Amino acid sequence: MSKNGLSPAPLVLITGATSGLGLALAHHYQRTGARLVLVGRKPLAALDSALFTPATYCQSDLSQPDAALEIGEWLVQHDVQHLELLIHNAGLGYYGALATQPPTSIETLIQVNLKTPLALTHRLFPQLALGHGKVVFISSVAAALPVPDYAVYGATKAALDGLARNLRVELAGRIAVQVIHPGAIRTEMHAKSGIPAGQLSTERFPTAAQVAAQTVRAIATQRAEITLGASNRLVMFAGHWAGGLLETFASRRRA
Ligand SMILES: NC(=O)c1ccc[n+]([C@@H]2O[C@H](COP(=O)([O-])OP(=O)(O)OC[C@H]3O[C@@H](n4cnc5c(N)ncnc54)[C@H](OP(=O)(O)O)[C@@H]3O)[C@@H](O)[C@H]2O)c1
């Protein structure tokens, strides 16, 4: 409860809110009147001041081991005591065989996609408990599929699924935990991952706004795991129940 006794607006923290799906989610929750905490690595001056202000924006490089502490400190300084929704959305990929991926790139990817979400969830348990909050991990269909040339990315997403499965049991009745599996989205992530231009027909992918609308609907449900879109659900089903066949198929395509 706030000092005046009124229920405060729900507080929504979104990591990776400066582009793609995270930015579209931020616009959505701004329209609902939620109080926002938006996390990104870009300087505030480079961002849209209608959304990103000193009161809403926490600049933090999530590849740094102390990022969770830094964000926790920001929340203390801004008197954020309760948290209703924590969306672990920030993520990055690397395109190429593991053998060619530089060790520093492997470490950055694991830090941003897995270690920081874990550490941040850990750091924010008190605020989440106070807000009877929900933690949402944005995973990927890549968690359940052979994704050659995205091995570390796929591993981090599968690890998030495992983390969420166990947190759900540990936190049952106190903090809700959900995993969302989008399929491909038309965002800058593909170009940032280093995939050669033209190798993917990204114009066929749904936009970030479309996937954000699906994500918001998924978050409103009580379901523990949700894959967005019928074709992605089919792919996930195949990944879970016919993984060996998919591996054989993927290997033959590369041969
Ligand atoms: N795109 C897809 O096809 C797809 C499919 C399935 C799942 N996903 C997942 O969806 C989520 C959002 O991805 P997207 O497609 O929206 O990609 P995106 O447009 O590249 O957005 C990723 C966000 O994460 C931020 N980020 C990356 N590294 C960071 C760091 N070190 N510190 C702070 N912020 C950092 C980015 O910041 P900058 O703006 O500074 O780069 C950006 O705000 C990711 O978890 C991704 O794995 C994407």
Image (cartoon, rainbow, N blue to C red):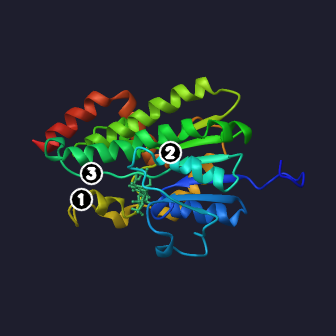
Tell whether 227 sits left or right of 192.
right
Please report the residue visible at 73 percent of the width from the left and 39 percent of the height from the top.
130
Rendering coords of residue 240 (x, y %): 39, 30
Label 1 within 8 A of ligand 1 by Cβ = no
* Callouts 3 and 1 close, C-beta under 8 Å: yes
The tag on residue 68 is 2
Indicate which disc, 3 or 1, sits on the residue closer to the N terminus. Answer: 3
Mark 2, ligand 1, within 8 Å: the answer is no
Residue type at mark 1 is Gly
For the view shown, which residue lies furthest in the right direction? 5
| Percent of width and height locating residue 58 | 55, 59
Q: Are marks 1 and 2 in contact (CB under 8 Å)?
A: no
Q: Residues within 10 Å of mark 1 (few under 14, many from 20)?
A: few
| Quadrant hosting ligand 1 | bottom left
- Residue 19 in view (yes/no): yes
Q: Residue at x 70, y 59 (%)?
A: 35
- Please give the name of the residue rendered at 24% of the width and 47% of the height, measured from the top-left corner: 104
Relative to 29, 10 lies left or right: right
Check the picture and name the quadrant holding the C terminus: top left
Q: Secondary structure at mark 3?
A: loop
Closer to the eye: label 3 or 2: 2
**Amino acid on which disc 3 is placed:** Tyr
- Front-lying residue, 31 or 58: 58
Mark 3 or mark 2: whose residue is earlier in sequence: 2
The residue singled out by tag 1 in the image is: 194
Distance CA(mark 3)–CA(mark 1):
6 Å
- Mark nearer the N terminus (1 vs 2): 2
Tag on residue 94?
Answer: 3
Find numbered disc 2 in the image and state the secondary structure of the residue it sits on: helix
Total number of numbered discs in the rendering: 3
